[in-house]
Image (cartoon, rainbow, N blue to C red):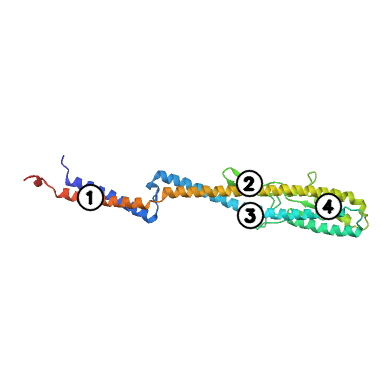
Amino acid sequence: MRVSSTYLTAIMTRSFERNSGKISKIIEQQSTGKRVNLPSDDPIASSQLVNLQRENSALKQFQSNISRLQTSLSQQETVVAAINQQTDAIIDDLLSAANASHSRADMGSFAHSIDGKIESVIAALNQKNEDNHALFGGTLSDKQPIVFDAKTQQYRYQGNDQTRETTVANGINIKENTLMSGVFSKAGNDLAVLNQLTALSNKMKNSKIVPSSYLAELQSAHEMMLQASKKLGATFTDLGGRQNRLSMLAEAHTDIATSNSQAMDALANSNPAQASTDLNLYKMSIQASGMTYMKISQLSLFNYMS
C-alpha cells in the first residue's frame, strides 16, 4: 500500500498537534498546581469536586450559624446566671424576714432589699443583644418583654411563648431563644411570682401593718422562689445541653470539611513528579516522531533501485 506524502504529512501534523496540546496541558498543570483546571480535563473528577465544594459551602454556613448561636446562648446563660444569683439572694432575704421577732422597721429594710433585687431580675429579663433585640421575649424581640402597669401595679409580660430555630446541620435545628416568663409563673399566670412578691414587699414597707399578719405570706413567697430557682436550674441545664450539642456539631463539621478539602486536593492537584515524567515522555515522542518523519520523507523509490 502506497502512502502519499500529503497523507503522511497530515498524520504527522495531527500527531504533533496532539502531543503539543498534551505538553501545553501539563505545563498549565505545573503552573497552577492543579490537575483539573477545566471540567473537560476530567469530567468525573470535576463532578465530584462540584459536589464536595457544594457540601463545604453548606458546612461553612452551618459553622457560621453555630458560631452566631453559640454567642447568643452564651449571653443568655450569663444573664440567666445573674437572675439566678438575684433569686437566691431574694430567697435568703425571705428566709431571714420570716421571723416574728423582727420589727416593722426591720421588715421595711428587708422589703427595700427585695425591691432592688426584683428590679435587677426585671432588668435582666429585659436584656437585649447586640442587635437591640430582646433576649427573652419569645419571637416578639422588637419590644421590651416586661413592663410595669401603673394601673394594676403589676408587671406584665408582653412577649410570647414561641421559639426560633437555627439550622446547624442537615435536618438538625436547634432552638435559639430561651423562654423565661414561665420561670416566675404560677398556675399559668406569667410573672405571678414576682407580682405577689412585689405586693408582699409593699406590705412589709407599710409601717401600719403588723409583721405577724403576713408571716404566712413570707413562707409562701419563699416556697415560690425556691420553685423559681429550680426552674432556673432546668433552664441552665437546657442552655448547657444546647451549647454542648453545638460544640460537637462544630467539631464534626470541621472534621468533614477537612476530609472534603483533602479529597478535593487529591482530585484536583497535580502530581509534580508524574507531570514532569509525562512532560518528558511527550517531548521525546515529538522528537522521535519528527526524526521518523524526516527520514521517511527523504525516502523515494530510487532508494531501492540500485
Which kind of residue does numbered mark 3 sit on?
A: Thr
The CA distance from mark 2 to mark 4 is 34 Å
Which kind of residue does numbered mark 4 sit on?
A: Leu
- Looking at the rendered structure, the secondary structure element under dot 2 is strand
Q: Earlier in the sequence, mark 1 or mark 3?
A: 3
Residue 199 is marked as none
Does the residue at mark 1 contact the one at mark 2 (Cβ under 8 Å)? Answer: no
Q: Residues within 10 Å of mark 2 (few under 14, many from 20)?
A: some
Q: Which residue is mark 3?
A: 71
Instruction: Name the residue located 48 percent from the left edge and 48 percent from the top edge.
Output: 260
From the viewer's side, name the closer residue of 149 and 53.
53
Q: Residues within 10 Å of mark 3 (few under 14, many from 20)?
A: few
Instruction: Name the residue located 79 percent from the left edge and 49 percent from the top edge.
Output: 226
Q: Residues within 10 Å of mark 1 (few under 14, many from 20)?
A: few
Q: Position of residue 20 (x, y in %)?
A: 29, 51
Q: Earlier in the sequence, mark 4 or mark 3?
A: 3
Which kind of residue does numbered mark 1 sit on?
A: Ala
- Looking at the rendered structure, the secondary structure element under dot 3 is helix
The CA distance from mark 3 to mark 2 is 14 Å
- Residue 254 is at least partly visible in this image: yes
The CA distance from mark 1 to mark 4 is 99 Å
Residue 197 is marked as 4
- Residue 134 is at least partly visible in this image: no
Q: Position of residue 174 (x, y in %)?
A: 63, 46
- In this rendering, would 174 be left or right of 146? left
